[in-house]
Image (cartoon, rainbow, N blue to C red):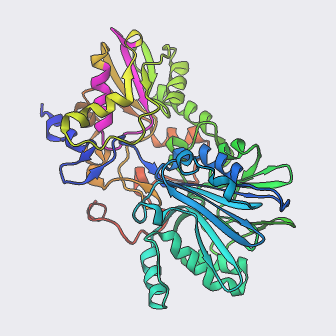
Amino acid sequence: MTDLSNKYDITAHGTGLNAAGESLTADDKFHDECGVCGYYSPDKSFDCAPLLYYGLYALQHRGQESAGITVSKDGHSKTHKDVGLVADVFSHGELKELPGNVGIGHVRYSTSGEGGRTNAQPLSVKTQNSDLSLAHNGNLVNDQVLREILEYNGIVFQTTIDTEVMVNFIARNLRFGIVPAIQKLVEIIKGAYALVMTIDGKLIGVRDPYGLRPICLGKRGDDYILASESCAIDAMGGTLIRDLEPGEIVIIDENGIKSYGQKNWVKQKICIFEQIYFARPDTVMDGVSIYECRHKAGQILAKENPIDADVVIGVPDSGIPAAIGYAEASGIPYGIGLIKNKYSGRTFIQPTQELREQAIRLKLNPLRKVIEGKRVIVIDDSIVRGNTSKRLVEILREGGAKEVHFLVSSPPIKHTCHFGIDTPSRKYLIGAQHSVDEINEILGSDSLGYLSIDGLMESVGMKDGCCLACFDGNYPMEVPRLDEEEAEN
């Protein structure tokens, strides 16, 4: 049998540089690019910045590169933003310098444009009669074309992100009214997005026509909240009302909340990876409990992949609900077999191969008492490149596991996302390049099993309405910038 673990050089695909000389992240996971939240109080003496801080803190898992808050008082805006985590960016009394009853916040993981303070959000522009501020979660697929049009018409850009394209398009059309300006933007842009804005003392939320990116509405007394996830509404002391519908625009001011539709109707395609990995387990998204979704995926995984074993463990954190579900459905005891270092962060770009190989051991350590001498089922939410999964198998064997059976609570990832999820080219997706048996050999596990697409859809309670492009390649819209690997495959 061919030794695929050597043929497929996973060690070169870890942190640092891969075999092609490209920089890769250490944790071998997809990354969402942003989290957004917004707050409106009819009490003009109320300062919302501290609550926005709590909301961003709850959304920190969606982006750790930069953070920012913009507040508006009497139609005039003020912003503080910088690179770093929320607690670091707002660690020296900056919140006291942000008075205002209306505001928006943003945490970023960059997929469009470079990093750094310049590209941190929210972005603000001053028009002849208004202050406009915008924060964006998602990714446009036609932003370069739109940028060129604006530049041809004399617009000078200060950033390299697609958010500035949207800010400028809205600002140019505000003379027609706020709602027509936003509707015109939505007619032109293509991609996935959830937007929060402040204009003239109003708080505005927008969800893309497919509903790819999440945004929900909450209430705190007489105040209103917008956020990427309901866990942020909880953190701000509010109560979830509902998710914005795909294509919906909501405008909140002293008259309450008004909802508007968009002109281009399409079929709903919610990003399935919100349920699989991105969202916090305590979030309720589009009427679905994220925890229950992952728990049920584990139960279905047990039916589809029955294994005779002694203990079931989950990869912290998103693999744990599925592991508990698998254990309950199979009757095999659940155990905590991996301990996560919660302070490891994203710090593993190391200069030597030895230190790169050590990185996963700093993040996850086996609990020998649980796994030693046992047949272990380990469950993770996904496998992207495979480098982390291979290391996990090695760590469990070194911890004394007699057998290691690797199960995944999602189907094999075979295609790149073009709608705001940070994914590698297809040639680096192990599921696109190898069969399940080959991947099992590469990982060095005793067996490998994935959840089926039908099983996944059953776990989220939908027969349709989700974007599954990373699994089946059926993108909800035309993608004009496919890389060479996508085009060839």
For the point 49% across and 91% down, which residue is it?
153
Q: Position of residue 162 (x, y in %)?
A: 48, 70
Residue at 31% over, 34% down: 359
Above or below, 236 against 248 in this view is above
Determine if residue 107 is in view. yes
Which residue is the extreme one toward the front? 92
Q: Is residue 428 left or right of residue 320?
A: left
Q: How many dots with numbers?
A: 0
Q: Residue at x 39, y 63 (%)?
A: 114
Quadrant in which the C terminus appears = bottom left
Query: Can you see residue 210?
Result: no
* Residue depicted at 42% across the width and 76% down the height: 144
Residue 364: x and y in percent read 38, 27
Residue 173, position as x, y percentages in the image? 64, 85
Horizontal side of residue 205 vs 224, given as left or right: left
Q: Nearer the viewer, residue 360 or 190?
A: 360
Decide which of 241, 235 is in the foreground and name it: 235
| On screen, residue 184 above or below 47 | below
Residue 325 lies in the magenta-colored region: no
Image quadrant in which the N terminus is located: top left
Residue projecting furthest to the bottom: 153
Residue 9 screen position, x and y as percent: 18, 41
Which stretch is magenta? 371-396
Q: Taking 218 as reference, is 320 above or below it?
A: above
Is residue 382 part of the magenta span, yes or no?
Answer: yes
